[in-house]
Amino acid sequence: MPGTSLTVESTIELPAAASVSKVDTGSRQARASGLRRPDAQRVRGIRQRVGRVPAPVLCLVSMLAVQLGVAASKPLFGVLGVAGATFLRISFAAVVLLAVTRPRLRGRSPRDLAMAGLLGVASAGMTLLFAGAVDRLPMGTAATIEFLGPLAVALVFARRAGHVLWAALAAAGVALLTLLSGEGGSGPGGLDPVGLACAFGAAACYAGYILFTDKVGAAFKGFEGLAVSFTIGTVVLAPFGAAEAVHGLSGSDSPALLLLAVAGVALLFPVLPYALEMTALRRMSQRVFSVIVSLDPAVSALVGLLVLGQVLGLPQLLGIGCVVAASVGATLTARR
């Protein structure tokens, strides 16, 4: 939520037995302080430094991490399959966040748990469907269609006529990019129809992700809610990707190296970007967040060009330009 800052609670627990002498108690406290306080202070220092970074910068870093993670994931699709690679990435992300945050569910309201569950479903769907879209479409095209999710949120929370006009400009950019693509395929503009379906599905999940991330970020401390949601996302993805992942690992010559590669990609995406976006959404409105992340298509197209050699034509570049212009205009005219 806007204006909400991250807090860190001390993890030091002092022994409280009546029979323990003050000297023993003091020595135990000293040992606990020596072992635990430096770690807690480091975590507190990192979060304080992140807290001083402007929220829009966090969004930009998050977008870059997402697209680099997606580009790094593409070689894994051929070995593990789209669903298998996605399942393993989300599983690794859940393990890392559970180990770091150790969330406590006791005393949580049913509403808070439900929001975390819905965020897990939305995150799992968005990650899986976007991976399926990127597997069949250029990254810039897939990211621009996925932007329809944040665009819908921006429209719902629009309070000025100008905001609707900026959103319409972004929608025109999406139409340019999809209808005049020129890529091989049987869908609109020659695009792969399955890839288009995945991209539009990812857009719907993205809208839910924005809404639920704001709620979960307000209800849970730190990234506890994110750990819970990723765990639920792992369960949701298991029927789609677990068997595919096992098959890919069993057929690999170096399953340990393959798992290490997946773990590295998981840290890049989704752990880092989702954590940064949750932090940003605590300090800005959902509408402002939605228009800032509309820069994602441009970032995606740039990463696709530099990393994967995906060259876009003039209509696609014009479409992305419309989306970026709409983002800049909406951001400049937004009210915090």
Image (cartoon, grey):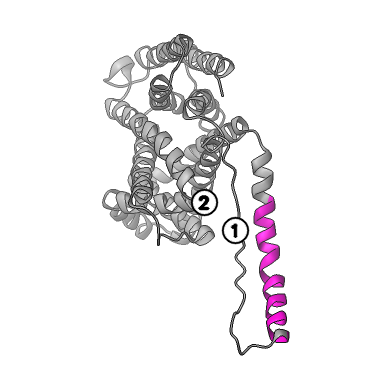
- Residue at image position (67%, 74%) is 32
Amino acid found under the numbered disc labelled 2: Lys
Residue 9: assigned label: 1
Q: Which residue is mark 2?
A: 221
Amino acid found under the numbered disc labelled 1: Glu
Residue toward you, 78 or 243: 243
Question: Seen in the image, is 135 located left or right of residue 307?
Answer: left
Residue toward you, 264 or 322: 322
Q: Position of residue 11 (x, y in %)?
A: 60, 65
Specify start and end residues of the magenta stretch as a single range: 23-45
Q: Is residue 151 visible?
A: yes
Q: Are the two marked residues, 1 and 2, in contact with CB atoms closer than 8 angstroms?
A: yes
Residue 109: assigned label: none
Pick whichever of labels 1 and 2 is earlier in the sequence.
1
In which quadrant of the rendered view does residue 335 lie?
Answer: top right
Q: Secondary structure at mark 2?
A: loop
